[in-house]
Amino acid sequence: MSATGLPVFDETVQLTNIWLNELMEAMGWTDRHRAYLGLRVTLQQLRDHLPVDEAAHLGAQLPMLVRGFYYEGWHPAHKPLKARDQDAFLIALHNGFRQLPTDEPIDPAAVAGAVFGLVGRRIAAGEARQVREALPRGIRALWPEPAAAAHG
């Protein structure tokens, strides 16, 4: 029996949970809300630092539920952002993590690396390579070296 009544919704919830679990494992976290926020904030910053066409191609590779928060609040005009250096990227991540109801620090560079690694493993290898290459050099440096992708 379907938990939501629609198998397509059940599948995207399951895939999203797999992504969150992988991020939690990579970061040593037990808080799913922290993992969700880390994934959402990082993907949205990644999106805003990509050319619009590349951001759309990446969005098409994401599970439906992840795609929803990836596109949440997106205004493609004036993208990619003009401030495209690593420091500005990490500050934006840090500011996004302020939504957590805890004072426990989060290392934005570690979260970015974990999310980029997750994306690189979960989307088509060719798309992951294109996304990585479309990033400014400083932000690209946060992306782990490509490995064999496992779609899902």
Image (cartoon, rainbow, N blue to C red):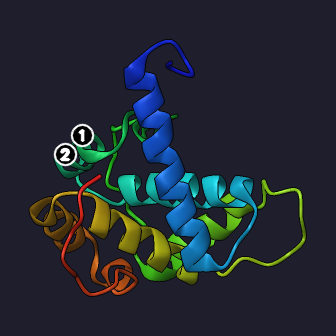
Q: Residue at x 14, y 66 (%)?
A: 125
- Residue 95 drawn above or below residue 69: below
SS for dot 1: helix
* Residue 66 relative to residue 33: left or right: left
- Residue 138 drawn above or below residue 89: below
Based on the displayed image, in which of its 4 quarters is residue 148 positioned?
bottom left
Residue 142 seen: yes
Q: Residue at x 17, y 73 (%)?
A: 133
Residue 139 % position (x, y): 37, 78
User: Is disc 2 surrounded by few (<14), some (14 to 19) or many (20+) residues within 10 Å?
Assistant: few
- Residue 95 drawn above or below residue 15: below
User: Is disc 1 surrounded by few (<14), some (14 to 19) or many (20+) residues within 10 Å?
Assistant: few
What amino acid type should be assigned to the residue bearing mark 2? His
Q: Which mark is residue 57?
A: 2
Q: Residue at x 43, y 45 (%)?
A: 15
Q: Which mark is residue 60?
A: 1
Residue 108 seen: no
The residue sitting at the top extreme is 5
What amino acid type should be assigned to the residue bearing mark 1? Ala
Based on the displayed image, in which of its 4 quarters is residue 9 positioned?
top left
The answer to whether marks 1 and 2 mark residues whose Cβ atoms lie closer than 8 Å is: yes
Based on the displayed image, in which of its 4 quarters is residue 123 positioned?
bottom left
- Residue 29 drawn above or below residue 39: below
* Residue 68 relative to residue 130: left or right: right
Residue 104 % position (x, y): 85, 75
Residue 35 % position (x, y): 64, 60
Q: Residue at x 28, y 75 (%)?
A: 136
Q: Which mark is residue 124?
A: none
SS for dot 2: helix
* Residue 71 relative to residue 78: left or right: right
Q: Disc 1 and disc 2: Cα gap in Å?
A: 5 Å
